[in-house]
């Protein structure tokens, strides 16, 4: 009996030890796999486009964006028209299919990623089906042969963006993941990003683009967007002196759109700014626009894209 008991007990112990050994081994293997995955994510170097900032169609700058000149069609090929389908669009417009409206600009920076302002998603940030991102656009009033529109599979606002909960528009940056990969064309291509933490030199000329409100009265019943893409040259000034200097500025419909600069005449265009906010209205020459500095958020953008890849 004792022998049988010991044998039985030994068998039970062996089974128990074997079971816990298997569980422990599985846990260690899972930990190893998770560690390898985390290491892979952390060590993964994001390959930003090397062919960027070089429009096939050259741009020409003459005047201001308010009541100013249309851009040469597709001369800013990274420009994105971010369009949203509002809840009541079908009710108000009497349409069978709800209509999408241009609401913000954006910049194509990666094969399926658009950079824009976080405040563009104060509404509908969690309703991806309401959004589409249109590239290759010049005229907003009809469908163009050059355009390609994508659905949205992810909207990532910076975690530090707290407006309107807090009265500040710090961290006004967001990334949008497109529902497909972009195939570059003469009318659609990427803007380059600046170097990490690069600060623009005072007096440097940069250019902003968008379909902003031409009335200068902001969004509302009187809002009239430009039919075609506009452009404007903007000088860079120190933040603490910007209220005292005569400036042109972009209009409120241009929120989220790019501020691009060149180091020299033949250098690629780099997107240094995201249109964040400006004065109330658009016909006030001595009030500047403020842009989110893209170079300060490159690590954040890389982390967002990495995390999305490994979801």
Image (spheres, rainbow, N blue to C red):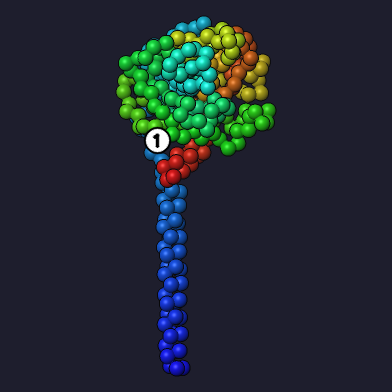
Taking depth in this image into account, of 202 and 242 the one nearest to the observer is 242
Residue drawn at the location 45% of the way across and 9% of the way down:
227
Residue 266 seen in this snapshot: no
Q: SS at mark 1?
A: loop
Residue drawn at the location 43% of the way across and 30% of the way down:
152
Residue 179 at x, y percent in the picture: 39, 32
Residue 152 seen in this snapshot: yes
- Looking at the picture, does residue 63 appear above or below residue 291? above
Taking depth in this image into account, of 9 and 242 the one nearest to the observer is 9
State left or right for residue 186 relative to residue 162.
left
- The residue at the far front in this view is 1
- Looking at the picture, does residue 173 appear above or below residue 89? below
Dividing the picture into quadrants, the one containing residue 31 is bottom left
Residue 172 at x, y percent in the picture: 57, 29
Residue 35 at x, y percent in the picture: 45, 56
Badge count: 1
- The residue at the far top in this view is 67
Quarter of the image with the C terminus is top left
Residue drawn at the location 46% of the way across and 29% of the way down:
129
State left or right for residue 44 relative to residue 235.
left
Label 1: how many Cα within 10 Å (few below 14, some 14–19, many 20+):
some
Quarter of the image with the N terminus is bottom left
Dividing the picture into quadrants, the one containing residue 269 is top left
Residue 281 at x, y percent in the picture: 61, 12
Taking depth in this image into account, of 288 and 31 the one nearest to the observer is 31
Residue drawn at the location 42% of the way across and 45% of the way down:
310
- Looking at the picture, does residue 5 appear above or below residue 214? below
Q: Which residue is mark 1?
A: 48
State left or right for residue 174 relative to residue 150.
right
Taking depth in this image into account, of 170 and 121 the one nearest to the observer is 121
């Amino acid at each position: 009996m004792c022998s049988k008991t010991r044998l039985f007990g030994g068998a039970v112990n062996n089974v128990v030890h074997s079971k816990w050994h298997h569980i422990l081994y599985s846990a260690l293997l899972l930990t190893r796999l998770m560690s390898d995955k985390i290491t892979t994510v952390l060590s993964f170097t994001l390959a930003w486009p090397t062919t960027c900032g070089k429009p096939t169609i050259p741009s020409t700058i003459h005047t201001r964006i308010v009541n100013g000149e249309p851009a040469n069609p597709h001369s800013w090929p990274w420009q994105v028209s971010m369009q949203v389908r509002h809840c009541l669009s079908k009710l108000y417009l009497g349409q069978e299919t709800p209509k999408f409206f241009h609401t913000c600009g954006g910049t194509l920076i990666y094969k399926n990623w658009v950079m824009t302002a976080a405040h563009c998603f104060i509404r509908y940030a969690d309703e991806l089906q309401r959004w589409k991102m249109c590239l290759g656009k010049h005229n907003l009033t009809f469908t163009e042969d050059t355009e390609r529109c994508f659905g949205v599979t992810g909207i990532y606002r910076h975690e530090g963006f707290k407006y309107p909960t807090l009265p500040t528009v710090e961290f006004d940056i967001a990334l949008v993941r497109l529902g497909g990969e972009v195939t570059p064309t003469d009318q659609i291509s990427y803007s380059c990003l600046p170097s990490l933490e690069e600060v623009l030199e005072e007096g440097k000329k940069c250019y902003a683009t968008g379909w902003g409100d031409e009335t200068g009265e902001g969004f509302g019943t009187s809002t009239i967007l430009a039919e075609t893409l506009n452009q404007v040259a903007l000088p860079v000034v120190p933040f603490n002196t910007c209220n005292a200097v005569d400036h042109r500025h972009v209009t409120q419909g241009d929120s989220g759109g790019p501020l691009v600069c060149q180091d020299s005449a033949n250098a690629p265009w780099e997107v240094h700014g995201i249109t964040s906010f400006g004065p109330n209205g658009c016909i006030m020459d001595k009030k500047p626009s403020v842009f989110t500095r893209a170079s300060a958020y490159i690590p954040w953008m890389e982390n967002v894209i990495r995390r999305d890849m490994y979801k």
